[in-house]
Amino acid sequence: LLQGELLQNGSDVKTAGCGTVVGEKGGFDNFCDMGKLKTPIQHDHSLLVRVPSYNTLPCSYFTREGVRIDSFESLARAKKEGEDNVNVYAVPAGRLFMFAPKFVGEEFDLSHVSHPENKRIYLETLSVSPRVFDIHGFFVDSEADDIVERALAQQSESHKLKRSSTGANGYSVSSTRTSENAFDTHSKSAKDLKERCFDVLGIRPYRESLADGLQVLRYNITTAYIPHLDWIDPSPQLEHDFITSGTGSNRFATILLYMTDFEKVEGGETVFVKGASLDPEAPSKEKALADLRADERLSGLFKRDSWEEKMVSQCKSALSVSPKRAKSVLFYSQHPDGRKDEASLHGGCPVLVEKQKWAANLWVWNAPRLGYPEAPVKLDKGNSKNKQRRKKNSSEQADPRAANQKDEQKHVTFKNRGGDPTFKDAVLHYEDTFWGNLGYSQQHSVNSFEGHVW
């Protein structure tokens, strides 16, 4: 109703960072409804109510800090004391909220996000392009210790600490990624951090289908990870649709967590090679390389003209973040319209001293991720799953009762009735993807299809 009023009145409202004004012909309604070929299917897609008189999908609305405005009461609460206007941020149907900084140093108060020690959580903008933020107060020392201890104790072959891999086609090591990693999918600390991550990003409620497991990383002297994008390149071997400018899903945002302290001279930074350094005295890449080669100790760590040597010079000249215990950083891998953000190119800088760097990362996807039944698939493979999902969602929009009609989708419930000690601490997986704990008296209800392996 609010959007209908805005469209009819031609109000002078702008959408942050998109240059679209409500009053322009075909402006705001086309911004909110990008069309079937550019609208990813979210879990609540069938609940969207089309805008009266326009028959277009509505935007979702947020405060500047990512709090959802879903009622006139929440709109009233969004009005800040002493201000005449309410800043409302519009997000197209099927898309997710994204912080819209205007300058380096700008802060976003996240007092609505709970903290384990009831401390303030807030964002500080480190870069506008790429979008990079320091999340002050995101997690605490005890959580950092627990994550590291669990990674060291992990025995599962798929989750234990081992040489880091790359790509989406299974375990594959790379000469340009020399760190080690483990995964924590369902410890209390991992689940708490993932849910807090979603709160920070303005994604509620928490959905496991939008999150990867917590990846825990260990770097030793000289180990590093060459600059790369977290956005996954499409694979011809997979039917998953990774193209997020359309209806696909891919990594949308990353939160980096640091468990150890490093000084700038010790290396181990996270570098954003296309971002401007925050150090006004930062050297050029050429000067940084010359300084490295002139240092007798450091020059002996790497082969001349190696990718590691080049990377050290990038780490000293571009935007870089040094690890600090219980420090965290947020960056986005996509633009608000789903396009891949090439500026988010980043890497793990070589460790320059005999010291272990521990870190972790949380990946959040823009729509159900690879491995989930509702994940988008390529239409050019002749696969009709996306068409079936869209047809189902469209019919549910027109008639909510259609959601109860029988089709090939099955509603399945897994329940642990208890009594068998073997399954006291059971967990549920969809193929090799962790779904949730399934201990005594716990249950999970899912939508699935024949042929899916649980």
Image: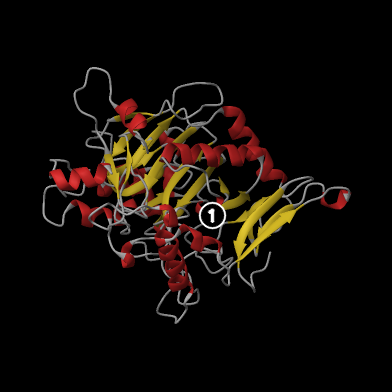
Q: Is residue 84 above or below residue 30?
A: above
Q: Residue furthest top?
A: 82
Say whether residue 108 is visible.
yes
Between 271 and 366, the one nearer to me in the picture: 366
Percent of width and height locating residue 403: 52, 61
Residue type, label 1: Ser
The residue pinned by badge 1 equals 209
Between 191 and 229, the one nearer to me in the picture: 191
Between 164 and 229, the one nearer to me in the picture: 229
Image-quadrant location for residue 276: top left
Q: Is residue 332 above or below residue 282?
A: below
Lateral position of residue 317 relative to residue 151, left or right: left
Say whether residue 15 is visible.
no
Image-quadrant location for residue 441: top right
Q: How many marks?
A: 1
Percent of width and height locating residue 228: 40, 57
Q: Identify the secondary structure beneath mark 1.
A: helix
